[in-house]
Amino acid sequence: MAVVKFMVRVAGRESTVDIVKRNGLYEVDLNGKKYSVDSRNFGGADLFSFLVDGHSFLVDSAPVNAERGEYYARVLGRHYDVDVLDELQLAVRDAERVHEHTGAYVLRAPMPGLIVHVQAKLGAHVKAGEAVVIMEAMKMRNELSTEVGGVVKSVEVKVGDKVDSQAPLVTIERE
């Protein structure tokens, strides 16, 4: 049985993931910790049910740009931007992003929606993974978090704004 290896990035944190399918279940090794996972597609093509070591999770997930390993996932009402990269994709993305680790980071809307709360304040310090905007999309509230720590340089939205997919929400100057 072949082991499939990935590097997964969520909220700026990287994890190595090895997956083997045996007897209809997945054996997942996440940073050295092993899990037994049963996965089923549930309803629409982007809705999955996961049973992870006896704990059930309903995950809404879809590609943002599958060729580049970019996806979104919604678990328990929280939105996550997720990069799932095999070894080749990881090498290509890292080579492209050499210059991205300096300068401003722009948090963009992952989908069209309504801004219901803005946590970010101009001039405030934020940490990587911190929620800075809450938006409602498809009748679900999504906490949008920054992938970098730094100082909020601009807030482009206010409560009640309707935004399109990829609209800039908050700009953060990296520390």
Image: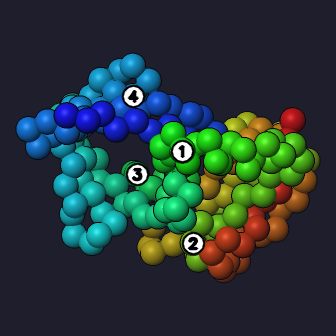
The residue lying furthest to the top in this view is 32
Question: Is residue 77 among what the camera can see?
Answer: no
Q: Are marks 2 and 4 in contact (CB under 8 Å)?
A: no
* Few, some or many residues within 10 Å of mark 4 (<14, 14–19, 20+): some
Residue drawn where x is 67% and y is 71% of the image? 166
How far separated are the C-alphas under marks 4 and 3?
A: 18 Å
Q: Are marks 1 and 4 in contact (CB under 8 Å)?
A: no
Location of mark 1 (residue): 88
Of residues 104 and 2, the one drawn nearer to the viewer in this rendering: 2
Where residue 18 sits: x, y (%)?
Answer: 36, 32
Q: Earlier in the sequence, mark 2 or mark 1?
A: 1
User: Which numbered tag is attached to residue 75?
Assistant: 3
Residue drawn where x is 89% and y is 47% of the image? 103
Location of mark 2 (residue): 111
Identify the element where label 4 is drawn: strand
Quadrant assignment, res 117 = bottom right
Give the residue type that dot 1 points to.
Leu
How far separated are the C-alphas under marks 1 and 4?
A: 19 Å
Residue drawn where x is 45% and y is 75% of the image? 138
Location of mark 4 (residue): 30
Q: Earlier in the sequence, mark 3 or mark 1?
A: 3
Where residue 27 sits: x, y (%)?
Answer: 23, 32
* Few, some or many residues within 10 Å of mark 2 (<14, 14–19, 20+): some
Identify the element where label 2 is drawn: loop
* Few, some or many residues within 10 Å of mark 3 (<14, 14–19, 20+): few
Identify the element where label 3 is drawn: strand
In front: label 3 or label 1 = 1
How far separated are the C-alphas under marks 2 and 1?
A: 28 Å
